[in-house]
Amino acid sequence: MATTAHQAQPPAKGPDSRGLAGQTVGDTAICMVNQTQLVYRGYEIADLAQHASFEEVAYLLLAGHKPSAAELEEFKREQGALRAIPASVRDAIVRICRESPTAHPMSILRTGVSLLSHLDPDCESLAPDAELRKAKRLLAQIPTIIGTCQRALEGKAPIDPDPSLDHSANLLWCMSGTKPDALAARILDVSLVLYAEHDFNASTFAARVIASTESDLHSAVCGAIGALKGPLHGGANEAAMEMLKDIDRDCAGGAMSVEAWMTRAFAEKRKLMGFGHRVYKNGDHRAPILRNWGLKLASSLGASAKRWFDLGDEVQAIMLRDKAIHPNVDFPCGMTYFIMGIPVPQYTPIFVASRITGWAAHVMEQHANNRIIRPLATYCGPAIHAWQ
């Protein structure tokens, strides 16, 4: 017989707080996100995108301050020397890709990071110097994992990373086996600057929750990769490009107008990826930065590349007119990476090659002033029942 003792109460009416929307859950000195600004350790994102390299931003996030010329030179030298991955990890990635070619590259990357943990001498240490060493190794080795994965999926042998190249150029080299030109390398570098950090987003919060149990950095990063894999988070850039490809296919040869396609999508309540943001209600200020760089590349490549930006601009205008929803950074990212020839399934792993800096900074910050993250929940289930 049911009892009325401890009767469950329905959730209080008011603003939708699912997903911790609008709730502040902790302090950080790493990043500030609000309606009009994105700031990494006191430096605004447009300033960084224009004047800083990704290596400088990585150093800023990991070390906590802007590098001097000597510090930057040493950091880049150190990164170049750390890029190779153990043969056992390389061979495992190649085997997975060949035996399971439909495996998601994010899952393969997660496995690669997990395998690296077993071979890292500092894996179980939470000491600040050990954590920084682990972060630097992962930053250097993740592009090698991505490149090994992509080449294996194409039936090609992995190639050694090039210590003479910057982080972004080396990432493209490891994937393609071709040294990128200056413009392509710079555009990828800017995208990595834009993606490096974003306070308590889903993957970073997941990493901090794991770190708060006093688990290790590799475990926290594996959890963060799992969170970033989802299409509502990191996978949005992949989904945005697939959406544009759908529009292009359905509208080919004038079979359908973009306006009609969008009207149908609205009627079907289709989720259009690359638009909207939990924080940036008036537009993601990273989006125009990356769009302008992508358009610069598209214009240099000709009409076949530029048409994707023309299509994107039309979709963006309709979304803004009919739904008052702005694009986020994932929308121009999809188009930009596509015309660079980067395979769509690798978009989110490339995100990891950047966000590893933010994740590691947050793990170190959590460990430096730790208390286990354990929120409460409002119970709204059945009343207490007797078992017999």
Image (cartoon, helix red, strand yellow):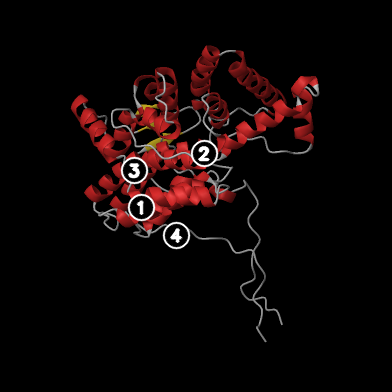
Mark 4 vs mark 1: which is more N-terminal?
1
- The local crowd at label 2, few if under 14, some if 14 to 19, many if 20 or more residues have their Cα within 10 Å, is few
Residue farthest toward the bottom in the current orientation of the protein:
388
The residue at which mark 3 appears reads as 361
- The local crowd at label 3, few if under 14, some if 14 to 19, many if 20 or more residues have their Cα within 10 Å, is many
Under circle 2, the secondary element is: loop
- The local crowd at label 4, few if under 14, some if 14 to 19, many if 20 or more residues have their Cα within 10 Å, is few
State the CA–CA distance, disc 2 to disc 4: 44 Å
State the CA–CA distance, disc 3 to disc 4: 21 Å
Residue 330: where, in percent of width, then height?
55, 32
In the visual, does 124 lie left or right of 291? left
Residue drawn at x 35%, y 20% is 51
Which amino acid type is shown beneath numbered disc 4? Arg
As displayed, is residue 359 above or below residue 119? Answer: above
**Residue 154's disc number:** 2
In front of the other: label 4 or label 1?
Answer: 1
Residue drawn at x 34%, y 59% is 214
In front of the other: label 3 or label 2?
Answer: 2
Residue drawn at x 67%, y 70% is 382
The residue at which mark 1 appears reads as 88
Q: Quadrant of residue 354?
A: top left
In front of the other: label 2 or label 4?
Answer: 2
Under circle 3, the secondary element is: helix
The residue at which mark 4 appears reads as 374
